[in-house]
Amino acid sequence: MSQKMQEYLKKAEVLIEALPYIQRFNRKIIVVKYGGSAMIDETLKKRVIEDVTLLKLVGFKPIIVHGGGKEISRWMEKTGKQPTFVNGLRVTDEETMEVAEMVLGKVNKGLVQLVESLGVRAIGLSGKDGGLLRAQKKFSDGKDIGFVGEVTSVDANVLLDLLEKDFLPIICPIGLGEDYQTYNINADDAACAIAQAVHAEKLAFLSDVEGICTDPADASTLISELTIQEGKQLIEKGAITGGMIPKLYSCIEAIQAGVSRVHILDGRIPHCLLLEIFTNRGIGTAIFEGERSRFYYGPDNQ
């Protein structure tokens, strides 16, 4: 058998391996929280959008929720304003809110343009559009950090209507308060709230870490599968630290609200979404409830 034919057979094996996953998640909603270096590196950005577009074309119903923290900080520095954070949350005064909304809007339409260039219809939304994200002022350990909001409600009908009409929604995490004040919402929190509201089958976080590791400095300690009970125990033991703690709590909350699986992936790896969703051994951390495995071995193990 020629080397070229062996290469073709390997490609065929990959497609066969993906088949049960395509069957399992056909017409199911998947929320992708897009952030980190994959938003800055143009090559990685293209790969992520290719992944999401492929998911759409094989029958999934993806929704993208994106951040833009690094880009916001860059623009703030251009205006001579130094970014300030409290417990990982950006202190957002009126001027910062204006910059954040401008930058997130620019990022949003850039992503729409990329998706459209690949032949899929996309619609970019702010959480303000159609009252999609309602928010209230968020405090950090009792401290007032400005116009930072936490989601109080999501109008799922806005997104379900777009999905039904075969659009790919792309959402930036800006919300409206009861007094119609604009709030900057943490993108992880927005993605979790949206996943819960639309009863997503999967929620995937793209970040700058391999996944959940017992030792963040050692990639070999990556935990491939994690139940929510095991996650809580790791936090209690102090094995999970820093910014991963609120992320893991958000994952647990989403699962308890009905999201079947949550994935934390390294967005720096090209095509990380496809590797995680369509292969028997993914590359990140899959979090779920109970004893069910993330891996598909047949109709009895979903």
Image (cartoon, rainbow, N blue to C red):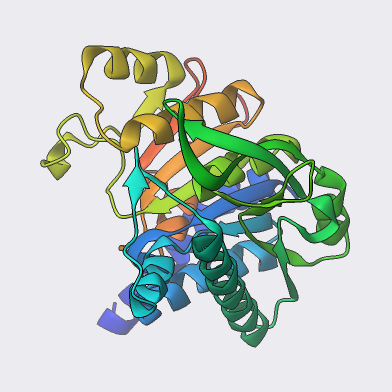
What residue is rendered at 36% in x and 68% in y? 81
Asked which quadrant contains residue 125, the reply is bottom right
Q: Is residue 178 left or right of residue 119?
A: right
Q: What residue is rendered at 80% in x and 53% in y?
A: 159
Q: Is residue 43 left or right of residue 253?
A: left
Residue ID at (19%, 29%): 214
Indicate the quadrant containing the N terminus: top left, top right, bottom left or bottom right.
bottom left
Q: Is residue 2 visible?
A: no
Image coordinates for residue 277, horizontal then vertical, percent: 49, 50
User: Which residue is found at the position 31% from the left and 42% from the top?
Assistant: 211
Q: Quadrant of residue 149?
A: top right
x and y, in percent, of residue 299 in the image: 62, 30
From where the camera sits, is residue 208 visible? yes
Q: Quadrant where the C terminus lies?
A: top right
Relative depth, front residue between 298 and 279: 279
Give the number of marks: 0
164 or 158, which is in the foreground?
A: 158
Q: Residue furthest bottom?
A: 117
Query: Is residue 153 placed above or below 59 in the rendered structure?
Result: above
Q: Is residue 238 above or below residue 36?
A: above
Which residue is at the front of the view, 11 or 150? 150
- What residue occupies the far left of the structure in this picture? 218
Q: Nearer the viewer, residue 134 or 220?
A: 134
Residue 234 on image: x %, y % = 28, 18
Q: Position of residue 88 (x, y in %)?
A: 35, 43
